[in-house]
Amino acid sequence: MPSAGFGTWNPESGPMYEAVRHALDIGYRLFDTAPSYGTEELLGRALRDSGVPREDVFLATKFPRDSEHGVRGSLESSLRRLGVDYVDLWLIHWPTSDGAHIETWRKFIDAKNSGRVLVTGVSNFSPRQIDELSSITGHVPEVNQVKWSPALHDPVVLEHSRNSWVALQGYSPLRASNVGHALLDRIAKRSGATVPQVVLRWNLEHGVTALSRSTSFAHIEENFSASDLKLTQREIAAIDRIYHAARRIRGRGDRLLGPP
């Protein structure tokens, strides 16, 4: 699974199609979508139009919590919209309050055995919910996709994922960040980079796949080049501490971050 990914949530399908094409042209090979995003079809079309071989691209989509088609039907619908025979990663988009996701997970295991899904995982699951799935079914999710940024960095989640051999994907790394944070700005200026690049590189330093999203060609290129940035261990540790400061502020009822 590539370490840098491209998210495709966007209600404006035209700009997103062009954005995906450009992302493919500059080297992105991990693309994330979901039925609720409304971008599976355009993502598949962009891939076919790009000429990039299907086997070179890592496609991820999700099973919606409110699916009317069941697990198998939802998978077939996603494959049809994407125009592919398999997806590299299929995720349970959200856990359910009634525990129905446990039976869904059993069906995910069957889907993987069918060859239509290469990797199975979950999204927005807590360590406790992952342990529950694993203990009941005997199968550990291979991926957990969660909202992740310096202000949301949770050492407990990170340690649990490493100990459980669950790969973390971080979505909204920039939208969930305070890009005006003084520390991030200082690090960016020191390295001749931008704050978004610092945030994305920080994700990668922790082994968290960073799923960024943009329809601006300049921002897409900027985000992709974050892989070339170097951060010192001291800088990484300083960025980690933003989480503790953010938790204290949230505890006082203040609002550090922008819209979720």
Image: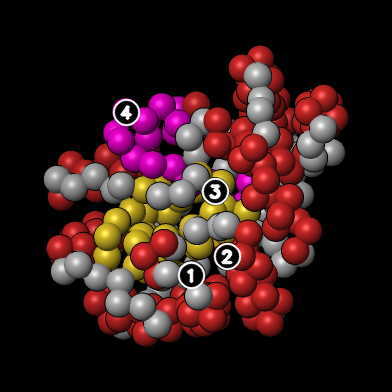
Callout 4: SS: helix
Residue that carries the numbered disc 4 in the rendered image: 163
Outermost residue, top side: 234
Q: Give neighbour class at mark 2: few <14, some 14-19, many 20+ (Cα, 10 Å).
A: many
Horizontal and vertical percent position of residue 55:
36, 65
Q: Nearer the viewer, mark 2 or mark 3?
A: 2
* Residue type at tag 4: Asn
Query: Mark 2 or mark 3: which comes first in sequence?
Result: 3
The reply to whether callout 2 and callout 3 are in contact (CB within 8 Å) is no
Q: Give neighbour class at mark 1: few <14, some 14-19, many 20+ (Cα, 10 Å).
A: some
Which labelled disc corresponds to residue 24?
2
Q: Give neighbour class at mark 3: few <14, some 14-19, many 20+ (Cα, 10 Å).
A: many
* Residue type at tag 1: Val
Q: CA distance from mark 1 to mark 2?
A: 8 Å
Residue sitting at 65 percent across and 19 percent down? 232
* Residue type at tag 2: Leu
The reply to whether callout 1 and callout 2 are in contact (CB within 8 Å) is yes
Query: Mark 1 or mark 3: which comes first in sequence?
Result: 3
Which labelled disc corresponds to residue 4?
3
Q: Nearer the viewer, mark 1 or mark 2?
A: 1
- Residue 186 seen in the current view: yes
